[in-house]
Structures are given as C-alpha cells and as structure tokens.
Amino acid sequence: MSHRPVSANGSHGIPEATVARLPVYLRTLYALAENGTATVSSEELAVAAGVNSAKLRKDLSHLGSYGTRGVGYDVEYLVYQVSRELGLTQDWPVAIIGAGNLGRALANYGGFASRGFRIAGLLDSDAAVVGTRIAGLAVQHSDEMETVVRRHRVSIGVIATPAGSAQSVCDRLVAAGVTSILNFAPVVLSVPDGVDVRKVDLSIELQILAFHAQRKASMSGPAVQVVGS
Amino acid sequence: MSHRPVSANGSHGIPEATVARLPVYLRTLYALAENGTATVSSEELAVAAGVNSAKLRKDLSHLGSYGTRGVGYDVEYLVYQVSRELGLTQDWPVAIIGAGNLGRALANYGGFASRGFRIAGLLDSDAAVVGTRIAGLAVQHSDEMETVVRRHRVSIGVIATPAGSAQSVCDRLVAAGVTSILNFAPVVLSVPDGVDVRKVDLSIELQILAFHAQRKASMSGPAVQVVGS
DNA sequence: CCGGCTTTGTGCAAACATTCACAAGGGCGT
DNA sequence: ACGCCCTTGTGAATGTTTGCACAAAGCCGG
Ligand SMILES: NC(=O)c1ccc[n+]([C@@H]2O[C@H](COP(=O)([O-])OP(=O)(O)OC[C@H]3O[C@@H](n4cnc5c(N)ncnc54)[C@H](O)[C@@H]3O)[C@@H](O)[C@H]2O)c1
Ligand SMILES: NC(=O)c1ccc[n+]([C@@H]2O[C@H](COP(=O)([O-])OP(=O)(O)OC[C@H]3O[C@@H](n4cnc5c(N)ncnc54)[C@H](O)[C@@H]3O)[C@@H](O)[C@H]2O)c1
C-alpha cells in the first residue's frame, strides 16, 4: 500500500517500514513484561520479534535513545515509548461497517479492545441483522453511519461489507469525517488525499503463498530444474 | 542486463514486491473481463489497480513480454499468464486449524474457493465444536491434523487458533509436511528454513492506522504547523 | 508501403530499506 | 577509582523498489 511520501521529513521522520514493525515489538514487549522480564537486550527482543537485531536497534533509535549501553532496554519504559509513538495512549473509537461473518468475528474479537481500540458502532444495511446484539453491541442501521461517526468522533472505519458496497461505504465514511480505513473487501478503494487506507486480503495472502509453494514444488519435484546457466 | 536466452523466466527472478501485487492485478483483470473489456493499456490497468503505470509495466515484464506496443494487453491472455505465474492453474488444498469465530468466517468465505483454494479440512480441538458442519464441511478433531494433511496433500495451512496454541499447531503442520502457513494468531511463529509464513494481523493494521491518524491530528490540531515563527 | 500515433519495455537514477561492523558509552566487579 | 566487558546507536556498504523518460515496436489510415 503506498502512502503519500510524507511531504517533509519533519519531526516525525519514522520510516514506514519501521512503523509497521513497532506493533510487533510492542506485542513482544508485553509478553516479556507479563513474563516478569524487566530488561531486554536488542538481541533478545529481536529474536523474539523475528527480526535482525541491528534493524531493531535502528527502528528504536527513531523514537529516541531509550536503551542503556551494556544493559539493554527497560521493558516497561519501552512499552510506554512505543505506545506513545503509535498513538496508543489515547482511545480510538472504531466503526465496523458490515455485520456479516467477518464483521461479527471482528466484533467478538477480544484483542480488538485490548489496545485502546473501542468499537463505537457496528452497522449493517440488512434489516434482518439490525437490532441483533453482537458482543454486547446492538447492530445499527447503516443509515446511522454519519450520526455514529460524528457522535463518537470515529476516525477509524473498518469495512467488512461485500466488495460491491465497499467503495460507496468508504465514500460515506470519508464524507462523515473518517480519515483512516481498514478494508477487508477485495477491492481497491479510491480515497482523497489525506485519507489512509490499509487492506487485509486473505485471498492475496494465499496467492502469494501459492506462488512460493509452486516455486518450492518445482525445485524438488519433476526434473524441470535449472535450465538457465 | 545479461539476456537470459530463453524460457519464460521461471527462473527465480520475480521481486517479492512484484509478487505481492500480482494478485491485485489479477483481481482487477477479472473485473475487466467480466465487464467485457478485451484489451487494456498499462495506464488503465494501473489506475484500476491503484498503482503507477511504470511499476505495473515493469511488474508484468517479469513474466514475459505479453503486451502489444501501441495497443496494450489482452485481458484474457494476461489473466492466464498471471494465474500461471502465481501457481493458480493448479488446485491448492488448504487446512484451517481452529473453528472459532474467525475459522468459521473463513470457512464460510466464498472468495476462498474461487481461485483454486479448496478447504480440505477444518479442524478444532474443542469436542463441542468437532462434528458440527460449517459451510458444508464437518469439523474434524485436531488429532486428525496429520492424517488430513497427508491424505489431501495439503501444503497450505491456515492457523486460526488462539495465540497460545499457534506455535504448537504450526509445529505439527510443518512436521506433517505443510510448507506454507497463513497465520491469524498474534504471535511470531518460528519455522524451519523452507517454510513460508505470512501473517494477517488486524491489531497491527489498526495500530499503523492509529500512528498516521495521530500524526494527522497533531498537524491540524494545535499550532504545530511550523511556519517559521 | 509509409509516416504518424500510441503504448510497451527498460536503462537509469533516486529513494528507501537492510545489514554489517565498530566506536562510544555505561555498568559492574574488584 | 579503574578497567573490563557488554550492548547500544549509527556510519557506511549493500540490496531492493520506485518512477521518470524515452527508444523501440506495432497498428492504422491513407
Ligand atoms: N469471511 C471471511 O473470512 C472473509 C475473508 C476475507 C475477506 N472477506 C471479505 O470481507 C467482506 C465481508 O465478508 P463476510 O464473509 O462477512 O460477508 P457477509 O456477506 O457475511 O457479510 C456482509 C455484510 O455486509 C452487509 N452489507 C452489505 N452492504 C452493506 C452496506 N452498503 N452497508 C452496510 N452493510 C452492508 C450485509 O448485510 C452483510 O451482513 C467481503 O468483502 C469479503 O470478501 C471475508
Ligand atoms: N476474530 C477475529 O476477528 C480475529 C481478528 C484478528 C485475529 N484473530 C486471531 O485469530 C485467532 C482466532 O480467533 P477467534 O476469534 O476465532 O478465536 P476463538 O476463540 O473464537 O476460536 C479459536 C478456536 O481454536 C480452537 N483451538 C484452540 N486450541 C486449538 C488447538 N490446539 N488445535 C485446534 N484448535 C484449537 C478453539 O477450540 C476455538 O474453537 C486468535 O489467535 C485471534 O487472536 C481473530
């Protein structure tokens, strides 16, 4: 997903690749903290997070100099710093549009609320679904989208409708003031500048796996190997 | 560049970034085909897929020279070529481990089977769930994992269990012969060389969105708009 | 058959990302 | 108080991805 190339490398010059890894570090740090670990070296943390330790250090160095040479990082302190950088010290109201199979699974997902993401609304256009309660939340009609977004100051919208409705739902969310969208529908959404879209696409992930699986298979399988040279 | 004389280039040269975009192009091409479009230019396809047209052309050039200068690409032919490259001309049996909220949503997901991915098994360790039918499939006990993987020659496994079980499920899948894993559990899986893991993590995506949302908020909010004192 | 128009395929340079390798810094044992 | 040992933070080297810009190539109208 290409984002705008961030106009100027202002005070916040954190590379996109780093931003994408910070949540992984954070999760790893939480696990360590729960485990009673007070201090961790870049090497240990890197192994636990599945990355190279130099990369981890460089990533963390973008947030500031929070380690102690010869010792490592204070787990609790680093949790705080990473959380702050990611904006997790505040609450983020989220609206989920589409209460089908996926929308319901998302609403039921505990890990959702666990990091400050609060479901402010669960909307659907199907009258048969509206009014039912999911995870303690009553499904609202999607006519309420604008109202919900404004009342709860929702800035993050999750699209879990069929592909055909995704763009129009997206447009409405944006018009209502949402500036960040997580899209589960298999379509490329088009949005105005200033709005961030991230997609989660099961089918794409499987196809990427299939590509590599095929490559592996043609290696050890039939004798169709090494032609080039 | 040294001109490799022949053969389609099955040789291992497609950049990872390209591989990740091919499924998007493929989806876009299917939409065009359904729409009756027979031929498409790189510019049109690029816009529909949400990428730069030079990038698209370079991506496609890795598969071979399938365009016609002055005209564009034949949609149907390109669908075939991209599909072949991704390994979608064959069937990929998939096993889903964990038939909870997410596992059930996945099993019910139509787009799953639509590209040659066939659910060969849906497994769970909970006796209360085993035996129930989901999307026409009986949930099997996870003791059957090895049997299912071997009998159906499953090479792609989908992990939809709680985080705590994910690594052990992963180990068993790998031991049984699975070499590609799609992981929905919020943990870093460790696997031997030769095994591919891709993760889908809702929580990470939200945190990335929160980071950018925070930055946007601090732009227009308080007078941080550096203008030069 | 030719010249003009359009669009591909790619050389190249810049931007971005990863990794190595080590000097600088800091704690700890003596 | 000192020096040893460990680990951070980062310059520099290397690798990857992007996007521009344009020559080469194919179609079409005349
Ligand atoms: N289920 C999965 O595992 C899965 C996986 C990957 C992607 N997806 C994608 O996620 C999306 C949802 O999948 P699903 O399985 O939940 O589908 P679903 O059909 O079960 O649910 C879709 C819901 O959206 C509602 N809806 C339709 N149009 C709407 C609108 N304009 N406004 C509000 N609500 C609307 C429908 O009433 C329905 O309840 C689809 O785009 C699907 O391709 C699903
Ligand atoms: N629900 C979501 O929207 C969502 C979103 C993102 C990530 N996730 C992650 O996906 C995973 C599944 O989420 P869920 O909401 O479906 O949870 P869930 O609790 O509803 O389902 C988990 C299922 O896995 C089964 N299970 C547990 N251990 C097992 C084992 N060893 N072998 C086989 N099956 C086993 C359980 O019996 C249960 O049926 C979790 O790791 C969760 O963090 C879920």
Image (tube, coloured by chain):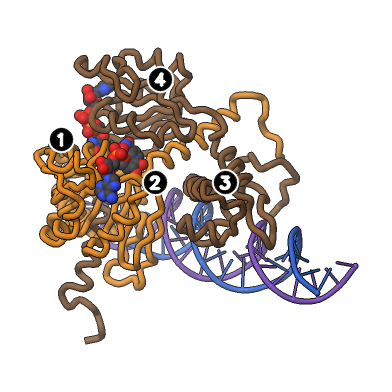
Chain colours: A orange, B brown, C purple, D blue
Q: Which residue is mark 1?
A: A35
Residue at horizontal 74 percent and vertical 43 percent from the top: B6
Q: Secondary structure at mark 4?
A: helix
- Label 4 within 8 A of ligand 2 by Cβ: no
Q: Secondary structure at mark 3?
A: loop
Q: Quadrant of residue A139?
A: top left
Q: CA distance from mark 1 to mark 3?
A: 42 Å
- Please check whether the numbered discs 3 and 4 fall on a single chain: yes
- Label 2 within 8 A of ligand 1 by Cβ: yes
User: Farthest front residue?
Assistant: A127
Q: Which residue is mark 3?
A: B14
Q: Please tell me the numbered disc located at residue B175.
A: 4
Q: Amino acid at mark 1?
A: Asn
- Please check whether the numbered discs 2 and 3 fall on a single chain: no
- Please check whether the numbered discs 1 and 4 fall on a single chain: no
Query: Which numbered mark, 1 or 4, is in the foreground of this view?
Result: 4
Q: Are marks 2 and 3 in contact (CB under 8 Å)?
A: no
